[in-house]
Image: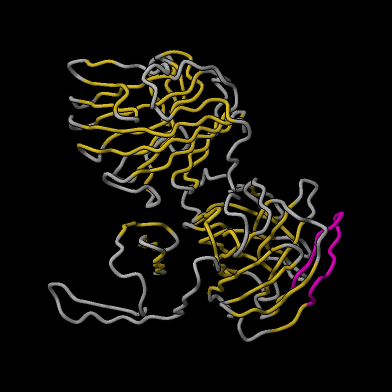
């Protein structure tokens, strides 16, 4: 189990296995020592050990730009198999198996970053020790990129892919820091300005300078030399904003020009405003409020706009009632019976759904999935819905949760929805609604 505690200003946050679990604010103690603690509850005998304790300044690895635990097979990584290789989601990780000798395989999620600090866990689950595997940065559309990689028998190096050929930037060397056999190695790659640096299990092993590619996608790579069969499993991929980098950099398109925005301070801006026996919906003290008095009810309002491709952002908080609910963003709204909904519940679940001819269909896995990236209870969650081409992507609190493809609705309105399930008495407040061009 990997714990991370952020104590910055009056903000305290706990992340477990790279997922934000809880956040609180308290300003009583502005500074002091750090340490470790264990305790027992009803039964004595608690026994555990700690390792790899590190303390860094809050800029050493800045904001999380992208993270992936590969629990959702619809999150956008390639799923492919032929006679030469396999790439797929397996056992909560991402597997690359190369069955052809002298061959490299890579996969990337389809984003654009400038400077990044990347981290991933990788385990060799089969094949010869001589196989290579590692991290990719600044991937170009033509297949050029940088690769920072190790081998199963303890070598490390940095290379550049250019015009289909490999150019060595830091030649292969060996290091005892690399764990052999089936042990997991923790890799870190820094791609900042023209500097490329590879860390393995916390130790800096290689550095190189090359300024040809200044931005691009990130990715994962595995390959073979004379023997085929390299088989590795990646997990817990993280991409950070490096120290001193521009805090505005984000992995998902934040969008271009603002097409529409509403902070709900003007009660005449066009949203539904109604009080009924079963529900209330409308403006309230600078936010947009939906109250559901009865169970098993969904209420929504479009913004009375028309768009094609959009990136939608909104803050949402459940302020009363059960956490078994629906809180979401609509896009490509045609009428009350036809639209897409990208939604969460405040007990930690999420899904993308389609309402067509008045009937609901859950897209992707067809089920609600759980993510600890969703803040439960009455906390504010930041939702982003991207509806671009036939791709629908839901991001919550800067963590991409799911992505699906559906082409039934190509354009339409945008809007907000709240729903009750088993209980009434649910109140949801929305604020800072923004629609941007992708």
- Number of marks in the rendered image: 0
Q: What's the residue at 64%, 78% (across, down)?
A: 204
Residue 91 x/y as whole percent: 47, 57
Q: Residue at image x 76%, y 46%?
A: 141
For the C terminus, the image quarter is top right
Front residue (pair 364, 413): 413
Q: Is residue 336 left or right of residue 121?
A: left
Residue most toward the left?
42
| Residue nearer the viewer, 68 or 65 | 65
Q: Is residue 241 above or below residue 150?
A: above
Residue 158 left/right relative to 42 = right
Q: Is residue 43 left or right of residue 218?
A: left
Q: Image quadrant of residue 234?
A: bottom right
Q: Identify whether 267 is placed above or below 30.
A: above
Residue 418, relative to residue 89: is it above or below? above
**Residue 9 location, x and y as percent?**
40, 63
* Magenta region includes residue 83: no
Query: According to the image, what is the colour scheme of the structure?
Result: secondary structure
Q: Residue at x 79, y 74 (%)?
A: 170
How far from the left and from the top, in percent, is residue 371? 39, 49
Residue 299, given in percent of the width and then of the height, sits at 31, 22
Kindly identify the residue that appears in the image at 51 percent across and 32 percent down.
Answer: 312
The stretch in magenta equals 157-171
Secondary structure mainly formed by the magenta segment: strand
């Amino acid at each position: 189990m990997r714990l991370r505690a952020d104590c910055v200003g009056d903000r305290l946050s706990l992340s477990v296995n790279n997922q934000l679990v809880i956040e609180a604010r308290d300003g009583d103690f502005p500074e002091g020592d750090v340490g470790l603690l264990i305790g027992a509850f009803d039964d004595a005998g608690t026994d555990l050990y700690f390792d790899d304790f590190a303390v860094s300044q809050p800029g050493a690895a800045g904001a999380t730009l992208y993270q992936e635990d590969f629990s959702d097979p619809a999150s956008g990584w390639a799923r492919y198999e032929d006679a030469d290789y396999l790439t797929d989601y397996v056992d909560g990780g991402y597997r690359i198996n190369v069955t052809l000798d002298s061959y490299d395989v890579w996969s990337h999620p389809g984003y654009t970053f400038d400077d990044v600090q990347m981290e991933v866990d990788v385990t060799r689950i089969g094949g010869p020790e001589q196989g290579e595997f590692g991290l990719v940065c600044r991937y170009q559309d033509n297949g050029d990129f940088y690769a920072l990689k190790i081998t199963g028998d303890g070598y490390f190096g940095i290379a550049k892919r250019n015009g289909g050929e490999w150019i060595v930037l830091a030649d292969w060397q060996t290091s005892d820091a690399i764990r052999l056999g089936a042990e997991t190695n923790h890799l870190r790659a820094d791609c900042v300005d023209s500097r490329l640096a590879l860390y393995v299990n916390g130790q800096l092993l290689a550095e190189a300078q090359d300024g040809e590619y200044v931005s691009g996608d990130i990715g994962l790579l595995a390959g073979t030399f004379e023997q085929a069969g390299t088989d590795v499993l990646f997990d817990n991929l993280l991409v950070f904003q490096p120290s001193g980098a521009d805090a505005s950099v984000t992995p998902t398109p934040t969008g271009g020009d603002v097409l529409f925005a509403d902070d709900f301070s003007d009660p005449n801006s066009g949203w539904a405003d109604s009080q009924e026996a079963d529900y209330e919906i409308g403006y309230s003290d600078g936010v947009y409020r939906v109250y559901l008095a009865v169970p098993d009810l969904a209420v929504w309002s479009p913004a009375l706009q028309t768009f094609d491709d959009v990136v939608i952002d909104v803050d949402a908080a459940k302020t009363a009632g059960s956490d078994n609910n629906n809180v979401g963003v609509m896009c490509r709204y045609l009428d009350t019976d036809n639209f897409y909904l990208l939604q969460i519940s405040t007990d930690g679940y999420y899904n993308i759904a389609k309402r067509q001819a008045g009937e609901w269909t859950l897209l992707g896995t067809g089920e609600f999935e759980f993510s600890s990236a969703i803040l439960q209870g009455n906390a504010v969650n930041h939702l982003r819905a991207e509806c671009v081409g036939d791709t629908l992507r839901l991001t919550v609190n800067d963590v991409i949760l799911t992505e699906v493809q559906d082409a039934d609705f190509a354009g339409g309105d945008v809007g907000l929805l709240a729903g009750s399930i088993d209980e009434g008495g649910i109140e949801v407040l929305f604020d800072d609604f923004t629609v941007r061009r992708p």
